[in-house]
């Protein structure tokens, strides 16, 4: 989620405490709608209206935590993200590699009310996290001459359903409105702080689609409207922005139960 460009190219819940304040999953009542089939996204196909297509395949462990995200590009080869978790279910590491190059790695350590992000031995981020696993702020750092400096801090606001409704990036404000459909990632076992970390790259913003899906985004005054086609169970299978058929996201799902 590059915040000053967040949703300019427009990519992209309610969380219940799992074993620690940083691990969350959806409740049965919320996720299955009282008995409906329950799904998690297993594939994302991005169609840019030409011969260019991206296919993203998502894999999970037995707790429905994301373990790998593998991308195949029409012309640019492949990209793979892998995730590691500790015994409490907290994400401790993710790495990204493209075309078998050396991976880009981030690791995470935990305090009572925060998560610290590292690039090797350097601190690059710190998230303040509340008891629901929601990130309330995200501070970004850089290191020069062996000294670490604060670059910027984003703050996050949520509604009564714990949906992200605003990002304040000091001099850039982004607001979100939601539909009433089931969220793409309603049943993915991922706390909001982790989704926010991943959405630093716009293509993973759909992990922010938790209880429902974002239907309107006001990005520092610029408004975009998002529409969806849903399947028989109420999950989005197609997403368009401002009715632009030249940039379409299509989702496939795996049944949880």
Image (spheres, rainbow, N blue to C red):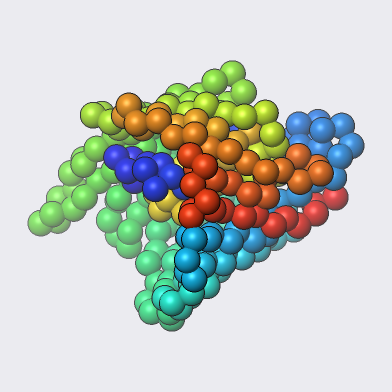
Q: Nearer the viewer, residue 33 or 104?
A: 33
Image vertical order of residue 129 relative to residue 118, above or below:
above
Q: Nearer the viewer, residue 100 or 141?
A: 100
Q: Image quarter for residue 208?
A: top right
Residue shown at the point (42%, 50%) measured from the top left? 202
Residue 226 horizontal side relative to residue 221, left or right: right
Residue shown at the point (42%, 57%) measured from the top left? 107
Q: Is any atom of residue 67 visible in this view?
A: no
Residue 220 horizontal side relative to residue 197, left or right: left
Residue 47 location in percent, x, y? Answer: 53, 61
Which residue sits furthest bottom?
A: 100
Image vertical order of residue 51 relative to residue 245, above or below:
below
Residue 213 location in percent, x, y? Answer: 60, 36
Residue 91 location in percent, x, y? Answer: 54, 52
Image vertical order of residue 62 relative to residue 5, above or below:
below
Residue shown at the point (40%, 59%) measured from the top left? 106
Residue 234 location in percent, x, y? Answer: 76, 39
Residue shown at the point (68%, 50%) measured from the top left? 237
Which residue sits furthest left?
A: 145
Image vertical order of residue 44 relative to residue 111, above or below:
below
Residue 87 horizontal side relative to residue 241, left or right: right
Q: Image quarter for residue 175?
A: top left
Which residue sits furthest top?
A: 160
Q: Is any atom of residue 243 visible in this view?
A: yes
Q: Quadrant of the N terminus?
A: top left
């Amino acid at each position: 989620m590059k915040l000053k460009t967040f949703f300019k190219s427009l990519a992209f819940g309610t969380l219940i405490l799992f074993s620690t304040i940083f691990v969350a999953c959806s409740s049965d009542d919320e996720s299955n709608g009282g008995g409906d089939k329950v799904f998690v996204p297993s594939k994302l196909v991005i169609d840019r209206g030409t011969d260019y297509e991206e296919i993203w395949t998502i894999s999970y462990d037995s707790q429905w935590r994301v373990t790998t995200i593998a991308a195949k590009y029409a012309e640019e080869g492949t990209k793979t993200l892998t995730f590691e978790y500790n015994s409490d279910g907290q994400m401790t590491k993710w790495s990204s590699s493209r075309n078998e190059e050396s991976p880009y790695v981030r690791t995470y350590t935990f305090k009572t009310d925060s998560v610290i992000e590292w690039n090797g031995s350097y601190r690059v981020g710190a998230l303040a996290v509340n008891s629901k696993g929601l990130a309330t702020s995200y501070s970004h750092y850089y290191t020069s001459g062996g000294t670490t400096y604060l670059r910027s801090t984003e703050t996050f606001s949520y509604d009564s359903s714990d949906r992200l409704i605003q990002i304040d990036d000091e001099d850039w404000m982004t607001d979100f409105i939601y539909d009433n459909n089931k969220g793409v990632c309603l049943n993915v076992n991922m706390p909001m702080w982790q989704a926010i970390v991943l959405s630093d790259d716009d293509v993973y913003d759909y992990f922010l689609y938790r209880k429902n899906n974002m239907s309107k985004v006001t990005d520092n005054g610029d408004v975009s409207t998002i529409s969806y086609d849903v399947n028989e169970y109420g999950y989005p299978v197609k997403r368009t922005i401002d009715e632009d058929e030249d940039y379409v996201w299509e989702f496939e799902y795996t049944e949880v139960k």
